[in-house]
Amino acid sequence: MSELTGVQKKYAPNSICFGCGPANDKGLRIDSHRIEGGLKTEFKTDLEHQAFPGIINGGIIGTLLDCHGNWTAAIAIMDNRGEEKPSCTVTANYSVKLIRPTPLDETLIITSKVVELLDDRATISMELHAGDKLCAKGKGLFVSVKEGHPAYHRWH
């Protein structure tokens, strides 16, 4: 696959996750790409993502940050271990701070950075911008799961 292929399509093309699953036609289907120290995605909102006219729902914002942060951790853990594909990671916890209303009519830019990396987990910081304005930020702990966990095979 090309370098232009996002990590979700490259490593989990059959994932049905609402936020990041390429196989979920009704989901958000984020498409995250590598940047120095993390990932970046651009997301164009639709009318059904609104909380009220012209403003994006906080749950949609949380989902975007959660899934993007989770993939940042998966890629960082994979790279750290020297593996060819990421192990499945899940969210242990995350928090979102909504800084200002996020407008409907702008492409959202979400970036993430690794804050702390251990062998089986990573703490990730995330930011969501609309234009040049920071609208939300978050931080999360994402953990690589072992066989026996319900999510273990979800990407493969």
Image (cartoon, rainbow, N blue to C red):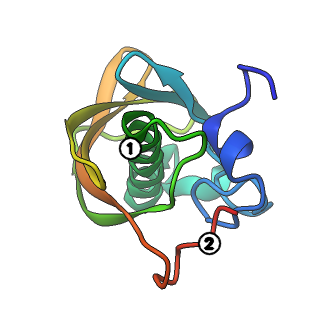
Q: Which residue is mark 1?
A: 77
Q: Tell me the element at label 1.
A: helix
Report, in whole angstroms, how far the alpha carbon at label 2 lies from the one at label 1: 17 Å
Label 2 close to label 1 by CB (< 8 Å):
no
Query: Horizontal placement of 96 versus 69: left or right?
Result: left
In the displayed image of the protein, which residue is found farthest to the front?
82
Asked whether 100 or 1 is in front, the reply is 1
Q: Residue 153 — which label?
A: 2
Q: Residue 41 — which label?
A: none
Numbered marks: total:
2
Picture quadrant where residue 137 is located: top left
User: Residue drawn at (28%, 49%), measured in percent from left and top?
Assistant: 119
Query: Horizontal placement of 99 versus 105: left or right?
Result: left
Q: Is 29 situated above or below 10? A: below
User: Residue drawn at (33%, 41%), measured in percent from left and top?
Assistant: 101
Query: Horizontal placement of 90 versus 142: left or right?
Result: right
Q: What amino acid type is highlighted by mark number 1? A: Ile
| Mark 2 or 1, nearer chain start | 1
